[in-house]
Image (cartoon, helix red, strand yellow):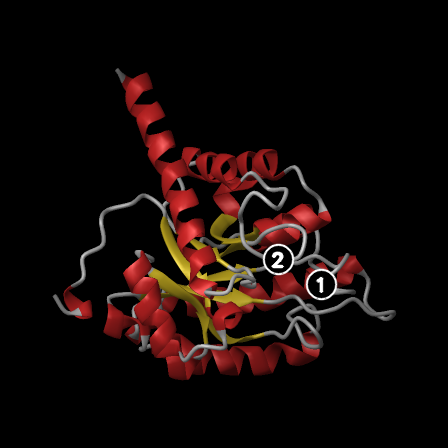
């Protein structure tokens, strides 16, 4: 069977891997190995990479479309909004052609001349401007909260309540959140209750071990099996993308283990629901 004929088994939650964490491998090699493990996609690809996963029966599960740089430039400053709209108008048709339905957006840093309240207002204005374009091309823009405590000092969108408020004010089904479990655990914790309380806004998830953003094994503090069961119980049917920096001799060993952990969690939750329904 060719990769293009590959038919992965039906799963309510699909798994993928974030490109940058395996950047030592060519994208074609990463796609090949991901398909062999059983993953369904590759996450956060740039436009000239959009079409590559389909060669291996995979999807590009999240696209980078030029909406921000978390270190210097983001949607929280109005002087960048024209450039973001131009980039999105250029890249959204390419994403649609490749069957991509999710695109990442980043907020940008705090600064002495920009309060969190003004940054939120600016972000809302930018996303309202982009939402009709997203709707035209069948794309959901996913704003990503990230931790400012350790990895991204000064990043403004570092609290879930701030990010949810932005989405609520935009009021578009094409603007939601990428909930990165690693960042949220470092910044706030309380993952399972946060998921239950805000599930309608979480369009996409990222994993990663805490501390260190390494494998999601038993050396770190997040109980991913329980977290994945919580995600499934909300009715989520999108992608969970693994975003950890491998430490094992064969980097794909940790990816295989992450895939198995998540599949076991989903199987357990499915068995529980079947038992309850009877």
**Residue ID for mark 2:** 213
* Residue 64: x %, y % from top left: 48, 73
Residue neighbourhood size for the residue with mark 1, other residues' Cα within 10 Å, grouped as few (<14), some (14–19), many (≥20): few
Residue 10 drawn above or below residue 116:
above
Residue 112 drawn above or below residue 11:
below
- Name the quadrant of the C terminus: top left
Q: Residue visible at 15% across and 69% down?
A: 2
- Name the quadrant of the N terminus: bottom left
Q: Is residue 62 visible?
A: no
Task: Report helix, strand or loop for mark 1.
Answer: loop
Count of numbered tags: 2
Left or right for 181, reference 257:
right
Residue 190 drawn above or below residue 237:
above
* Residue 20: x %, y % from top left: 52, 72
**Residue ID for mark 1:** 151
| Label 1 with label 2: CB-CB less than 8 Å | yes
């Amino acid at each position: 069977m060719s990769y293009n004929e590959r038919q992965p088994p039906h799963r309510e939650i699909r798994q993928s891997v974030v490109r940058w964490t395996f950047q030592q491998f060519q994208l074609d090699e990463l796609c090949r190995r991901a398909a062999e493990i059983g993953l369904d996609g590759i996450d956060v690809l740039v436009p000239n990479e959009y079409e590559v996963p389909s060669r291996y029966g995979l999807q590009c599960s999240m696209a980078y479309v030029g909406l921000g740089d978390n270190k210097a430039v983001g949607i929280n400053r109005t002087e960048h909004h024209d450039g973001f709209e131009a980039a999105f108008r250029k890249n959204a048709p390419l994403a649609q052609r490749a069957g991509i339905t999710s695109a990442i957006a980043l907020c940008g840093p705090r600064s002495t001349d920009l309060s969190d309240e003004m940054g939120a207002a600016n972000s809302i204005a930018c996303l309202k401007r982009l939402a009709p374009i997203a709707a035209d091309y069948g794309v959901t823009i996913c704003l990503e909260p990230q931790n400012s405590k350790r990895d991204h000092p000064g990043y403004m969108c570092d609290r879930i309540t701030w990010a949810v408020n932005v989405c609520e004010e935009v009021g578009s089904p094409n603007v939601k959140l990428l909930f990165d479990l690693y960042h949220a655990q470092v910044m706030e914790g309380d993952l399972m209750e946060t998921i239950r309380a805000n599930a309608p806004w979480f369009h996409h998830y990222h994993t990663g071990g805490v501390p260190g953003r390494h494998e999601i094994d038993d050396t770190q503090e997040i109980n991913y099996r329980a977290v994945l069961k919580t995600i499934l119980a909300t009715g989520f049917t999108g992608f969970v993308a693994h975003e950890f920096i491998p430490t094992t001799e064969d980097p794909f060993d940790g990816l295989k283990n992450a895939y198995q952990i998540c599949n076991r969690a989903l199987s357990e939750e499915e068995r529980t629901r079947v038992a309850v329904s009877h």
